[in-house]
Image: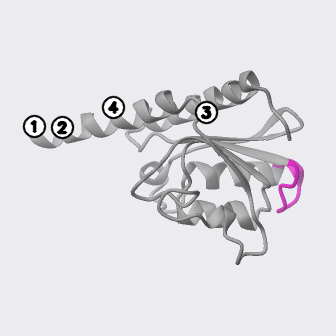
C-alpha cells in the first residue's frame, strides 16, 4: 500500500478529527482510521471514560468497525493511521488483526509499543510483523496531546 504524502496527511487529518471527538468528551485525544483501497473502513477515538471500558482505545474501536466492514477478523491490505504511537495492547491487537501497515503521527515515550518503549509491531519473534512509519503530521498530533495534558494539569491546580 503506497500512499503519497498528501494522501497520508489527509488520512491523518481524519484521525485527528477522531481525536477531537475524544477531546470533546474529556478523553485523552487519540484518533484512528483504517484504510483499505483508499477508503476509510474503520474509525475510532478513545472512549474509556465515556464507555467505562479500559480497552476502548482508538485503535480497538477502529479495528472493530473495520472487521465488521470487511466481514472478517483479518484486515489484510489495510493501513491503520493513528495520531499517537500505539500502546502494548493496541499493538497486540494490530498484529492479531494482521494489519500490515501502521502510520502514526507522534511518538509516545511513556506507553509506545511501536518503536519507542517497545517495538511489538516489528518484533521478529512474533509471527506477524508490521511496516511502521512515523512522523506524519507529527507536530499537529503532538500538539493536541500537549494541550490536553496542560489543561488537565491546570485544572488540577484549581481543584
Q: Look at the numbered discs 2 and 1 and tell me whether their residues touch, using CB distance below 8 Å.
A: yes
- Which residue is rendered at x = 17% and y = 36% of the image? 154
In which quadrant is the C terminus drawn? top left
Mark 1 or mark 4, earlier in chain: 4
Answer with left or right where residue 30 lies relative to residue 79.
Answer: left
Q: Secondary structure at mark 1?
A: helix
Question: Callout 4: few (<14), some (14-19), or many (20+) C-alpha neighbours within 10 Å?
Answer: few
Q: Which residue is mark 4?
A: 147
- Which residue is rendered at x = 30% and y = 40% of the image? 149
- Which residue is rendered at x = 44% and y = 59% of the image? 111
Q: Which residue is mark 1?
A: 158
Q: Which residue is mark 3?
A: 136
Q: Secondary structure at mark 4?
A: helix
Seen in the picture, residue 125 relative to 105 is either above or below; the reply is below
Residue 152 lies, in percent from the top left, at: 25, 40
Q: Is residue 72 magenta?
A: yes
Q: Secondary structure at mark 3?
A: loop
3D distance between C-alphas at marks 3 and 1: 35 Å
In which quadrant is the N terminus drawn? top right
Q: Which residue is mark 2?
A: 155
Residue 74 lies, in percent from the top left, at: 84, 61
Considering the whole magenta stretch, tell me its main secondary structure: loop
Q: Which region shows up in magenta?
A: 69-77
3D distance between C-alphas at marks 1 and 4: 17 Å
Q: Look at the numbered discs 4 and 2 and tell me whether their residues touch, using CB distance below 8 Å.
A: no
Amino acid at each position: 500500500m503506497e500512499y503519497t504524502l498528501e494522501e497520508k496527511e489527509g488520512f491523518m487529518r481524519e484521525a485527528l478529527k477522531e481525536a477531537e471527538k475524544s477531546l470533546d468528551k474529556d478523553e485523552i485525544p487519540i484518533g484512528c482510521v483504517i484504510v483499505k483501497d483508499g477508503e476509510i473502513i474503520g474509525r475510532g477515538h478513545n472512549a474509556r471514560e465515556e464507555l467505562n471500558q479500559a480497552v476502548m482505545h482508538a485503535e480497538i474501536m477502529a479495528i472493530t468497525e473495520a472487521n465488521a466492514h470487511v466481514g472478517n477478523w483479518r484486515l489484510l491490505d489495510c493501513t491503520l493511521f493513528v495520531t499517537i504511537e500505539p500502546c502494548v495492547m493496541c499493538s497486540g491487537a494490530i498484529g492479531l488483526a494482521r494489519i500490515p501497515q501502521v502510520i502514526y503521527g507522534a511518538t509516545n515515550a511513556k506507553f509506545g509499543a511501536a518503536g519507542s518503549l517497545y517495538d511489538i509491531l516489528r518484533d521478529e519473534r512474533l509471527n506477524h510483523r508490521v511496516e511502521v512509519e512515523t512522523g506524519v503530521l507529527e507536530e499537529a498530533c503532538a500538539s493536541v496531546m500537549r494541550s490536553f495534558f496542560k489543561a488537565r494539569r491546570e485544572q488540577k491546580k484549581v481543584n
